[in-house]
Image: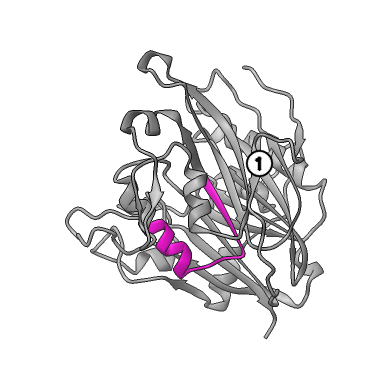
Amino acid sequence: KDSKKDQDHKKDSKSKSSKSNAAEPRTLSRSLTLTSFNLWNFNEPYLQRLNAICALLSDKPADWVGFQEARYDYYKEWDSGEQYQQSASGSFNGTHRFQVEHLAECLPGHQFAFDPAHTDLHTDTGRFHVDEGLASFSRLPVLASSYLRLTRDFGDEFDAHQRLVQRSLVETSLGPVNLFQTHLSLSPKARLRNVREIWAYVQRFSSPQVLLGDLNATPNDQAIRYLCGKFKQDGESGDFVDAWSLAEDRSVIRSSSEGSGDRKDPDKVIRNGYTFSSFEPNKRIDFFLLRGWDLLPEARVQGFEILGRQTINGSNEAPMYVSDHFPIQLILGERE
C-alpha cells in the first residue's frame, strides 16, 4: 500500500493547473444554480456530443458548473492534423487536445480552473501523455480556490486512478459559498478512505458548503452514509445532507425532457434519481451534498433537475446521449 501525503495546493497566477477568462459583470439574484456533469472525456461520437453539451449548457445555464473526466489528450490533435474551431453557427468541427478549451468556448465570460488528477503515459503509441481531472466554470466571482490530492492504494486494482477534491470559494447573492467537487474511486475501500480525507479537508473552510460530483457510489454505500452522518468510523462521521432527499420532500424534482435509456419505464429515472448509466439507468451515483445551510435560514432547495435525458442522435434503438451519466442541476434560493 502506497499513499501520498495530503497537501492543500493553493492556486495563484503562476499555477499551471488553473486558467481563467475575465468574468463579465453580473447582477446577482437571490439564488444559486449549480450543475454537476461527468463529461465522459473524449468518448465517441465526441464532436456530436460536444455540440449537444454546448446546447445543454446554453439551455440550462448555471452559476457554477463542475465537470468530471475533463481531459487533455495530446494525441487528439496530433492524430487528426486538425485544429478544432467553432463555426459561425456555433457548432464545432475538427478536434483539439484540451476539452477545457472547448468548454471555454461554450461558456464565455466564465472563470475556470482545471486540475488534472492522473496522467497516463503512452510513449509506445507515440502519445506524450493524457491527463484527466476536474474542471470548474463560474460566472460568479471566485474568491479563492484550492485542491487536495487524495490518497491512493496501488495494491488495490479498483483504485487504479489518482483522485482529488477541488474547491472554489464563490461570492453569491446568498453570501460566500464553498463549493467542492470530486470524482471518487471504483473501489469501496478507497472511497471510504477518501471521504474521510474529504471530511477532514472541508472542515478547514467556512460554511455553507456544497460537495458535488460523480461519487461512484449509491446512497447506501458506506462512503455516502459516512458523509451524511449515517455511518461512523473511529467514532467520526460527516454532517452533509443529501439535496435529493430535500428536493424529494418538497416535490421540486424535474427532468429536462422526456426519454430515458429504459423505454420500459422512463419515469423511473425521476422517481429514483438515477444518473447512471444513461443507456440503462439504474443507479444514483451523482450527488449534491449540503453542509451548513442552516446558517442561511432564507435559503432552501428550490429545484433539482436531471438533465440530458434526450437522445442526441434521434434513435431509440441505438440511442446516444451527451454522456454516459445524466448531468444534474440544483437550485438553492430564498424561502417562499
Q: Secondary structure at mark 1?
A: strand
Task: In this rendered view, identify the residue nearer to me: 21 or 141.
Answer: 21
Disc 1 packing (10 Å; few <14; some 14–19; many ≥20): some
Residue 306, given in percent of the width and then of the height, sits at 45, 65
Q: Name which residue lies at 50% across and 51% down.
A: 103
Task: In this rendered view, identify the residue nearer to me: 64 or 15.
Answer: 15
Residue 281, given in percent of the width and then of the height, sits at 35, 55
Q: Quadrant of residue 174?
A: bottom right
In the rendered structure, the answer to whether residue 176 lies left or right of residue 184 reads: right
Q: Which residue is mark 1?
A: 18
- Given the current orientation, which residue lies at the most extreme bottom position? 336
Q: Quadrant of the N terminus?
A: top right
- Given the current orientation, which residue lies at the most extreme left position? 317
Q: Is residue 164 visible?
A: yes
The coloring applied to the image is one colour
Numbered-mark total: 1
Residue 105, given in percent of the width and then of the height, sits at 49, 54
Q: Name which residue lies at 68% across and 63% down.
A: 140
Q: Name which residue lies at 53% across and 26% down.
A: 119
Q: Name which residue lies at 58% across and 34% down.
A: 116
Whether residue 41 is situated above or below residue 162 in the rendered picture: below
Tell me if residue 158 is in the magenta stretch. Answer: no
- Given the current orientation, which residue lies at the most extreme front position? 88
Q: Which residues are magenta?
A: 52-68
Task: In this rendered view, identify the residue nearer to me: 130 or 152.
Answer: 130
Whether residue 329 is situated above or below residue 302 in the rendered picture: above
Tell me if residue 54 is in the magenta stretch. Answer: yes
Identified by mark 1, the residue type is Ser
Q: Is residue 274 visible?
A: no
Residue 88, given in percent of the width and then of the height, sits at 38, 61
Q: Quadrant of the C terminus?
A: bottom right
